Structure formats: structure tokens, C-alpha cells
Image: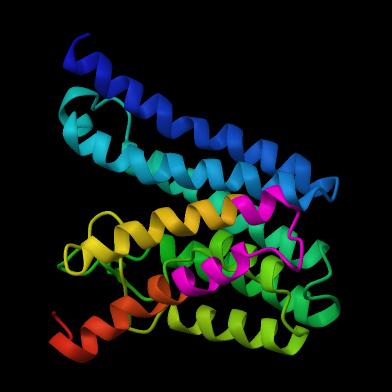
């Protein structure tokens, strides 16, 4: 198999995210939240491996007729933002005006964030919360906090999308990668398990989700405090 063929297959792998997004949306419309999140976890896994493969086979050079960055952004918006926002509202986690406010803010602000040319820092971290609403909403489903707590979490994260606070990229941020990468793999495992048991309140996966989520949420800010803004 030639390098060009491998590069094209990477684009095809990325494009499967549209399929996982559609399957997740169909499950969400039917209120099958566990199935929806299982498809979103699959999409998240694909998103985690297609980037390294794209760089390995240099898709910009060997399959330049397709814009991998644009394709990735389209898929990410569907799986990271659109489907999770729908689930947040329709599930009843944020009903009424807080729910309406949340889905409008999440979708509008995320669209602007995805188009922001300043979203990446020099060390390939994210500047501002990187619109990972799929992860946030899954944790809310698992932990099922009070509605006010959920609203505060969504509001704070939406505001931090445009504040220069670092959030680590699980695959590309080199500093503390030896911890961040296992934490990311752990999050995927705990998230998949939580969805598999249909978010049973006594599942041990919730503790794993809480610990790994806190690391992914706070590691970048901790690096800024320790090493400075450009650290």
C-alpha cells in the first residue's frame, strides 16, 4: 500500500465521525442516552488516533485534495457540540429557560471558538476551554449533580472558552504527557463503562470519571501557574 493510499485512508477514518455523529443523534432522538454516548465515545476514540496518523502519513502533502483540518472541525462540531447540547436539553438535566440558554450559548460560542485562529498555544495546548461538551455532558449524566450546579458548570466553561486559560491537548501537549495520556485513556474507558451500564448510580466508573476529568480540566491551568503563561 502506497503512502498516498494510506493518507487517503486517514481522511476516510476521520470522515467516519459523521457516521458516529448520526448514529448518536438517532439514539438521542429516541432518548437512548447510553447508546448515544457509546457512539460519541467511539467518535472520540477515532478523533484521538486520526491526528497522529495524519501527521505520520503527511496527509497535507500526500492527500492534499481533501482538507483534513476542515473535515476534522466539521466532525468535531457535530460530536463535541451539537449532539451533546441536544442531549443536555432533552434529557432534562437542564430543563426550561436554563436549558434553552445553555444550548444557545454552547452552540453559538463553540462555532466562534472553532473559527478562532488563536485556539492553539505554542505547546499545542488549547487556549480556552476547547468545546469538549461531549465529555462535559457525559460526566453530568454520570454524576447527575443538582440543576443549579450543572448550570454553573456549563456557564463557567462557556465563559472560559475565550479566556487565555490553557487546557492540555491529550495527544500533543508534551509537558506531563506521561500522565495526561493515561488519564485520557482512562477517561475513555470509564466513560464507555458508564454508558454501558446506562449510568447506574452505584457504578464505580463514576469515581474514575471524576478523577480523570479533573486532571484533563485543570492540568493546563496548573502548568500556567507553575511555568508561566508560555510554559
Residue 169 visible (yes or no): no
> Quarter of the image containing the C terminus?
bottom left
Give the dominant element type of the magenta stretch: helix, strand or loop: helix
**Is residue 36 found left or right of 80 in the rendered image?**
right
The one nearer the camera, 93 or 214, is 214
**Is residue 206 found left or right of 198 in the rendered image?**
left
**Is residue 196 found left or right of 156 in the rendered image?**
right
The one nearer the camera, 57 or 175, is 175
**Does the magenta portion include 196?**
yes
Specify the segment rendered in magenta: 193-213
Query: Is 184 placed above or below 196 here?
Result: below
The one nearer the camera, 71 or 190, is 190
Q: Which residue is at 51% across, 80% downward?
A: 157
The one nearer the camera, 183 or 7, is 183
**Does the magenta portion include 86?**
no
Q: Quadrant of residue 96?
A: bottom right
Amino acid at each position: 500500500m502506497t503512502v498516498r493510499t494510506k493518507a487517503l485512508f486517514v481522511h476516510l477514518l476521520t470522515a467516519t465521525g459523521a457516521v458516529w455523529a448520526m448514529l448518536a443523534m438517532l439514539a438521542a432522538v429516541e432518548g437512548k442516552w447510553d447508546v448515544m454516548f457509546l457512539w460519541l465515545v467511539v467518535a472520540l476514540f477515532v478523533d484521538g488516533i486520526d491526528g497522529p496518523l495524519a501527521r505520520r502519513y503527511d496527509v497535507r502533502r500526500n492527500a492534499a485534495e481533501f482538507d483534513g483540518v476542515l473535515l476534522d472541525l466539521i466532525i468535531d462540531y457535530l460530536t463535541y457540540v451539537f449532539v451533546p447540547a441536544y442531549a443536555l436539553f432533552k434529557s432534562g438535566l437542564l430543563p426550561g429557560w436554563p436549558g434553552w440558554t445553555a444550548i444557545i450559548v454552547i452552540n453559538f460560542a463553540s462555532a466562534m471558538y472553532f473559527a478562532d485562529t488563536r485556539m492553539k498555544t505554542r505547546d499545542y495546548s488549547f487556549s480556552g476551554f476547547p468545546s469538549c461538551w461531549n465529555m462535559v455532558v457525559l460526566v453530568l449524566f454520570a454524576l447527575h449533580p443538582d440543576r443549579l450546579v450543572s448550570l454553573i458548570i456549563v456557564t463557567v466553561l462557556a465563559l472560559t472558552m475565550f479566556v487565555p486559560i490553557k487546557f492540555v491537548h491529550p495527544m500533543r501537549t508534551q509537558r506531563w504527557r506521561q500522565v495526561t495520556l493515561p488519564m485520557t485513556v482512562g477517561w475513555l474507558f470509564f466513560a464507555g463503562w458508564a454508558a454501558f451500564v446506562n449510568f447506574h448510580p452505584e457504578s464505580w466508573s463514576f469515581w474514575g470519571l471524576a478523577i480523570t476529568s479533573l486532571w484533563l480540566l485543570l492540568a493546563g491551568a496548573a502548568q500556567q501557574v507553575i511555568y508561566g503563561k508560555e510554559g
